[in-house]
C-alpha cells in the first residue's frame, strides 16, 4: 500500500485543478461541471456522506469572503484617505456574486483534498463512508 500524500500535496494538486488523489489533469472538463470521478484513478469527486456538499459549499463561501476582505483591505490601504466607498460597496457586491462561481472548481477540489487527508482510508475507487 502506498503512503498517503501529505495535506500540502493534496491541496496543491487541488489548487492547480488536478485530481487531489493522483495529480492527473482532466477532472475539470468545464468550469462549473467536474467529472464525477477522476479519469485516471476513479476517485469520486463527491462523497456519498450526509453533509459533504455543505462542507464544499461552506469552503466556497469562506474563500469568496476572504477574497472580498483582501481586496477591500488593499483598496482601502492604497487609496487612503480618499477611499472610493461607493466603488468598494458596489464592487464588493459584484465580487460576492462572481467569486463563488469563479472559485467553485478550486474549492470543491480543495474540500476533496482535505477530506482525503482526514479520511485516507476512504479514498480511491470506493470513496465510501464508514458504515
Ligand atoms: Zn485521480
Image (cartoon, rainbow, N blue to C red):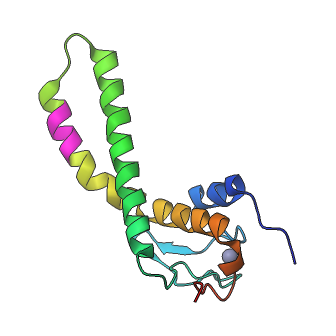
Residue 116 quadrant? bottom right
* Residue 92 falls left or right of residue 86: right
Work out whether residue 121 or residue 100 is closer to the camera in this orientation and state it.
121
- For the N terminus, the image quarter is bottom right
Work out whether residue 58 or residue 43 is closer to the camera in this orientation and state it.
58
| 73 in relation to 92, above or below | above
| 90 in relation to 48, above or below | above
- Residue that lies at the very extreme toward the right in this rendered image: 1
Q: How would you classify the magenta stretch by its main secondary structure? A: helix
**Magenta segment, which residues?**
88-93
- For the C terminus, the image quarter is bottom right
Q: Is residue 115 magenta?
A: no
Work out whether residue 43 or residue 54 is closer to the camera in this orientation and state it.
54
The residue at 48%/66% (across/down) is 108
Residue 72 quadrant? top left
- Residue that lies at the very extreme toward the top in this rendered image: 81
| 77 in relation to 120, above or below | above
The residue at 41%/74% (across/down) is 53
- Residue that lies at the very extreme toward the left in this rendered image: 86
Q: Position of residue 55 (x, y in %)?
A: 43, 66
Let me know if residue 119 appears in the view. yes
Ligand 1 placement by image quarter: bottom right
Residue 80 quadrant? top left
Q: Is residue 90 magenta?
A: yes
The residue at 20%/32% (across/down) is 88
The residue at 59%/61% (across/down) is 14
Amino acid at each position: 500500500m502506498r503512503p498517503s500524500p501529505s495535506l500540502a500535496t493534496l491541496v496543491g494538486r487541488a489548487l492547480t485543478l488536478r485530481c487531489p488523489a493522483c495529480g492527473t489533469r482532466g477532472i475539470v472538463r468545464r468550469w462549473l461541471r467536474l467529472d464525477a470521478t477522476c479519469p485516471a484513478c476513479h476517485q469520486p469527486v463527491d462523497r456519498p456522506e450526509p453533509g459533504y456538499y455543505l462542507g464544499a459549499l461552506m469552503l466556497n463561501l469562506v474563500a469568496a469572503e476572504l477574497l472580498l476582505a483582501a481586496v477591500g483591505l488593499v483598496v482601502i490601504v492604497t487609496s487612503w484617505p480618499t477611499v472610493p466607498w461607493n466603488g468598494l460597496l458596489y464592487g464588493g457586491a459584484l465580487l460576492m456574486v462572481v467569486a463563488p462561481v469563479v472559485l467553485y472548481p478550486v474549492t470543491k477540489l480543495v474540500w476533496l483534498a482535505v477530506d482525503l487527508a482526514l479520511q485516507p482510508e476512504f479514498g480511491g475507487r470506493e470513496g465510501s463512508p464508514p458504515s
